[in-house]
Image (spheres, rainbow, N blue to C red):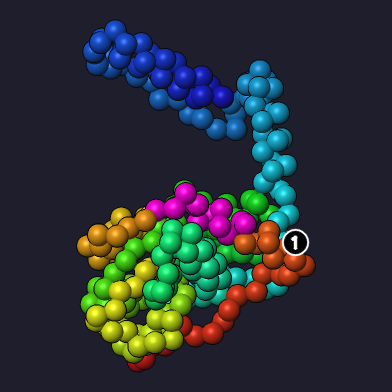
Amino acid sequence: MRFIQLFAIIILVSFASCQNKVSGRLANHELLTIDKTVGADSSMLALIEPYRDTLNLLMDEVIGFNETYMRSEKPESPLSNFVADLVLQAGAAFLAESGISGIEIMSLINVRGLRAPLQQGKVTMRNAFEVMPFENQMTVVKLNGIQIKRLFNHIAKSQGDGISGATFTMEGENAENITIGGKPLTDTTEYWVVTSDYLANGGDGYDVFQESEHILTAEAKIRDLIIAHIKMLHSNGQPIVADRRVRITVIG
């Protein structure tokens, strides 16, 4: 708690300095060891307690039931399949609401963005935040067939990622036999890729998205989509079940 008080003083001093345009430098300092020997500040605990208890109630809410333990792994996994599938469904609805139809669509989720496994049994709000701790928003990007080929080559180079609505064969760092919507990839066809704003902005080396002139960002966050989908399944009496059909076939 002493650290919190010191930090607050530093913030206040910094703010006052900015307001008064005062500059200076640190004349001396003292290193303080913060461990279990430092006593708790009872007044600070009393201030935090009601907020902490309310937050714990919200985070411990049971929102669904998972049949089997699922984790996110490369090249693909039940958890990344589950998330990619629900993101594809949400992306298709978003495009339809935007008046866009008659196009091929797939989704892409970075496997390492799913930071925790989904345990077997009851699933809480806390579990959903652990799986997706980031504030990534759903984004849809239009790419032509040539760009899609480069996208899949990057997926192969990255040793896989979560995809839905598409399949391909991974031979080393090359992607072959790409299909989207069950149809072979063609250079002249345009496709929509539903993904996160992180990847759409070039994260994890997905620079090809930045070549697009058509990028639409939805208000929905990926985590909120996960929570809403799990709640929907739970309200219908259905457990979480991942589609385990192979999407990425690894050769060699």
> Where does the image place residue 95, in percent across and percent down from the top left?
44, 63
Between 91 and 157, the one nearer to me in the picture: 91
Q: From the viewer's perspective, is 37 left or right of 192?
A: right
Task: Write down the region rendered in magenta.
Answer: 217-228
Q: From the viewer's perspective, is 157 left or right of 10?
A: left
Q: From the viewer's perspective, is 31 left or right of 245?
A: left
Where on the picture, by quarter, is residue 122? bottom right
- Residue 206: say if magenta: no
Which quadrant: the N terminus? Answer: top right
> Where does the image place residue 10, in percent across and percent down from the top left?
40, 18
Where on the picture, by quarter, is residue 170? bottom left
Give the class, few, some or many, for how many residues have Cα within 10 Å of label 1's Cα (few <14, many ≥20).
few
Between 249 and 231, the one nearer to me in the picture: 231
> Where does the image place residue 64, in percent across and percent down from the top left?
71, 61
Residue plotted at (46% across, 77% down): 165
Which quadrant: the C terminus? Answer: bottom left
SS type, badge 1: helix
- Residue 226: say if magenta: yes
Judging by the rendered image, the residue that carries numbered circle 1 is 235
Residue located farthest toward the top when viewing the structure as drawn: 20
Residue plotted at (40% across, 25% down): 31
Residue located farthest toward the right when viewing the structure as drawn: 237
Where on the picture, by quarter, is residue 232? bottom right
Amino acid bearing label 1? Ser
